[in-house]
Image: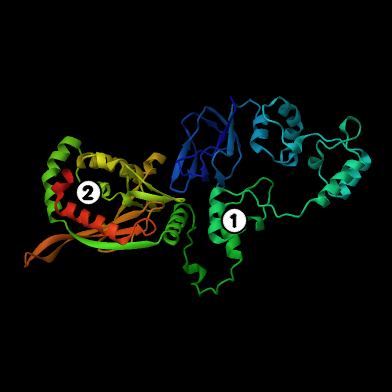
Amino acid sequence: MAQIFTMPQLGSTMEEGTILKWRKHEGDAVKSGEILLEIETDKASMEVESPIDGVLRKTLAKENDLVPIRQPIAIIASATESIDALLAEALGGAAAEAIPAPMSEALPTLSSAATTPAPSSLVEVFLSPRASRLAEEHNVSRAELAGRGTGPQGRIIERDILALVEARKAQPAEKASPRATPLAARVADDLGVDLSELTLGLPGSRVRRDDVVRYAESRQPAPALAATPAQEDVTIKPFAGMRKRIADNVAKSRFTAPHVTLTIEVDMTATAEFRQRILPEVEKVYGVRVSFTDIIIKAVARALGEHPMLNSALVGDEIRIYAHKNIGIAVALEEGLVVPVLKQAEEKSIGAIAQESKPLIDRVRGGKFTPDDLAGGTFTITNLGTFGIDNFDPIIVPPQAAILGVCRISDKPVVVNKAIVIRSMMNLCLSFDHRIVDGAPAARFLQRLKELLENPLLILI
């Protein structure tokens, strides 16, 4: 049975997606569960499967198109089945002239049997010869005249044209705001752009985020360009895809949330010894090796339970404090950063965290993750310790309240009980949104986290 395939919602926060690549093309057979196309959301790139068996009869969006969720992007049907009615439904208010000629001829008959009314532009309008000339003179379209005929059998006559022209004159001139995606509307508000100042091309098209940004940039004086190297000395890499998405997210976070970063030094000697002691047992029971990150996740979940404002988010005019501690783990890929989420970490043992986090991270690195793997984070941990970093300023994952940066563990001489000893030391860097959390509560959270890691048996209580 023929079916319209719409842009799927791959995650609760998704509003629109970019078609990266059609894996099937018009005329190709496709089976249910077979990869149909690749879509990029605001969080990641994902493969989308066909819901039914059939033939990809028509693609309604091109590669690199940004499409709102639930907007038609393809029609799947059998090889011989007519798709004219579905195509008319998918095109919605598109003008008849935009539909191929054989299709437009069939539409009036097909639409009369459909459950949805035909677009007004497809309604047949009869004009007298003199009315037709008058309509052309005053630039009146047939669609505007639908239902206005006062002549015999509803025919449009001269007085109907003149009445419409007079009605036009009586209407106050208004600048109508074009339809815009929710993201475009928010960006327009942030940049002070009046949507009514934007003009669109095709009827029914919507203003996108990029349209708003381009318009905002066009109003600014062009800056003087610095001298650049010769073209032959430059490798061009498109600023698009995941890199562009990350850029948009970090810019939004940095310029929306007032970041404050606190750093504390932690003695990880006891945690290192604790890890060595539990390694054999965890490996025997759970089949995985415990990492320092696994222990830190558990300690963070415990500390968040005592300091719930760090496990919150600012959504609109609401601060939402979450009961569960869903910890995001930043994973660096060649093309950018992805943050899979370990759900309800407060309810899991260290062994269970290790058992769940390893395949989760492996799926991300292998590009086989699902929308659910990235959804629902309430707090994020990012670890640059493997790169020898001692201090950094992590950027919050919006709309979360905070992110914890983990630095390297290194042996250092420190003073303990007035004696110089060698200890395994590590810095923790907490960035928090000062709109949600003040400095003192954030400092107390870090202080408690330090206490838990320096006395890891407390994590188990």
Q: Tag count in the figure?
A: 2
Q: Position of residue 48 (x, y in %)?
A: 47, 37
Mark closer to the observer (1, 2): 2
Kindly identify the residue that appears in the image at 49 percent across and 58 percent down. 239
- Quarter in which the N terminus is drawn: top right
Q: Is residue 425 visible?
A: yes
429 shown above or below 342? below
Q: Position of residue 412 (x, y in %)?
A: 14, 65
Q: How is the image coloured?
A: rainbow
Q: Position of residue 291 (x, y in %)?
A: 21, 48
Q: Position of residue 221 (x, y in %)?
A: 59, 71
Which kind of residue does numbered mark 2 sit on? Ala
Q: Earlier in the sequence, mark 1 or mark 2?
A: 1
**Farthest right residue in view:** 130
29 shown above or below 295? above
- Quarter in which the C terminus is drawn: top left
Query: Gap in Å between the C-alphas at discs 1 and 2?
Result: 45 Å
> Residue 95's image quarter?
top right
- For disc 1, the marked residue is 211
Which kind of residue does numbered mark 1 sit on? Asp
Q: Residues within 10 Å of mark 1 (few under 14, many from 20)?
A: some
Give the numbered dot on residue 299.
2
Q: Image check: 387 left or right of 179?
A: left
Q: Secondary structure at mark 1?
A: helix
